[in-house]
Image: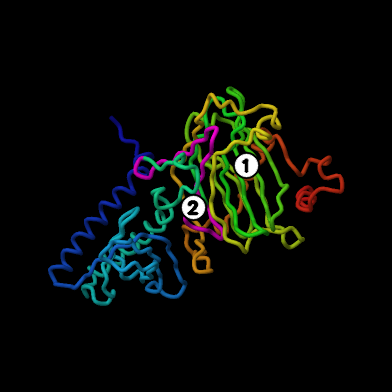
Amino acid sequence: MSLHLSGFIPTYLPIISSIFFSVIFSWHLLNFYKKDFKIIPYHYTIFSAVQFPLHPTNQLLLFKHIPYPSLTPINWKRRPICILIHCAQNTITVTLHRPMASFSSAPFANALFGLLIAFLFSTLSMVAFAGNLYEEVDITWGDGRGKILNNGELLTLSLDSYSGSGFQSKNQYLYGKLDMQIKLVPGNSAGTVTAYYLRSEGTSWGEIDFEFLGNLSDNPYIVHTNVYTQGKGDREEQFYLWFDPTADFHTYSFLWNPSHIVFYVDGRPIREFKNLEGVGVPYPKEQPMRLYSSLWNADNWATRGGLVKTNWSQAPFTVSFSNFRAKGCVWTNEASLCSSNSSNEAWLSRQLDAANQKRLKWVQKNFRIYNYCADFKRFPQGLPLECTIRSKS
């Protein structure tokens, strides 16, 4: 049996690295205890990571206090990265507190400790915003029709003739890259809508929408997208998908940064809304948004303009969610916390390169079925400004 290193290395390198650094950590920690260092454990949940471009010891990690009865229920704690020694991947983080200068003075030990800190910080950057759905979202309505299952790995929303259901993210974001795997309602889903969107609060809100419009069996879903700025939408684009979205999970993503908003399906861009504030087109940039999702009945418009009604004999209808990942600037205490100079936050300045521009055009040529910028009947007084600018570019 031959070993294919090209597949082996990318797959197993993170595991090998984790084991290697775990061994180093265990050995180094044992030496700490042998030398009778006073290391005090505390328990927190990773909430965010913030890096300031001042000095490595000024990097901060933001933790949320776990409400153990024996601990004071403090809302937030900030700790320098130099005191982070070990963290679990999802919920409980154990930090061992001691100034960096108090550790072993041996150059080799300090080098190992530096490597460990770099490894842990890079690992934290990768997992801090991804994980258990219990930690990421709250089911907000549906009277038990929304459920988090499999120890937080799966969330389902259901709809019957009495009610639908929905959830929202615990965090708000002012810019972010958010991914969710979704398996849509199978079979006869006509009249149902699965909404998955970002929205800010207030009367002059911003909103970035995915809506999946159900259909009769063997007829395709319609993916309905929209962008609201200052409380105004009317920027719909609709698509068919190039696969069956009910047969398996697929990843639906928002990229929202200061330059543009991009809608992705399985990593393929399907729509881009550029920041054209310089020529007078409003762009959502000042209000933080929360992620929402819901499954609800909209048979007055969702399928063939309301001609096809929901068949309640097929109820309950169920949509499933998994693997929520959010790399975002978390809004807390009236401020947005993120690091634009971290390689893990390259999304904050990401543009569509030539390859992705080509992929975008492929989707729009072959699968886009409605474009508001081509609907002259709807806008007899003239197309929206962003449409005329886009047509000239």
Residue ID at (67%, 59%):
203
For the residues marked 1 and 2, what is the alpha-carbon distance in whole angstroms?
24 Å
Decide: few, some or many residues near mark 1? Use Cα within 10 Å; few <14, some 14-19, many ≥20.
many
Q: Is residue 105 above or below residue 131?
A: below
Element marked by disc 1: strand
In the image, what residue occupies the spot 19% across and 73% down? 38
Three-letter code, disc 1: Ile
Mark 2 — residue? 169
Quadrant of residue 368 in the image? top right
Judged from the image, the secondary structure of the residue bearing numbered disc 2 is strand
Which numbered disc flags the more N-terminal residue, 1 or 2? 2
Q: Are marks 1 and 2 in contact (CB under 8 Å)?
A: no
Query: Which SS type dominates the magenta stretch?
Result: strand
- Which image quadrant for residue 298? top right
Taking the spot 53% from the left edge, 68% from the top edge, the residue there is 335
Residue closest to the far bottom: 101
The magenta stretch spans which residues? Answer: 150-177
Q: Residues within 10 Å of mark 2 (few under 14, many from 20)?
A: many
Q: According to the image, label 1 marks what residue?
A: 270
Most distant residue in the front direction: 162
> Could you tell me the amino acid type at mark 2?
Ser
Q: Position of residue 346 (x, y in %)?
A: 52, 57
Image position, residue 21 (x, y; %)? 27, 56
User: Which residue is more in the foreground, 393 or 157?
Assistant: 157
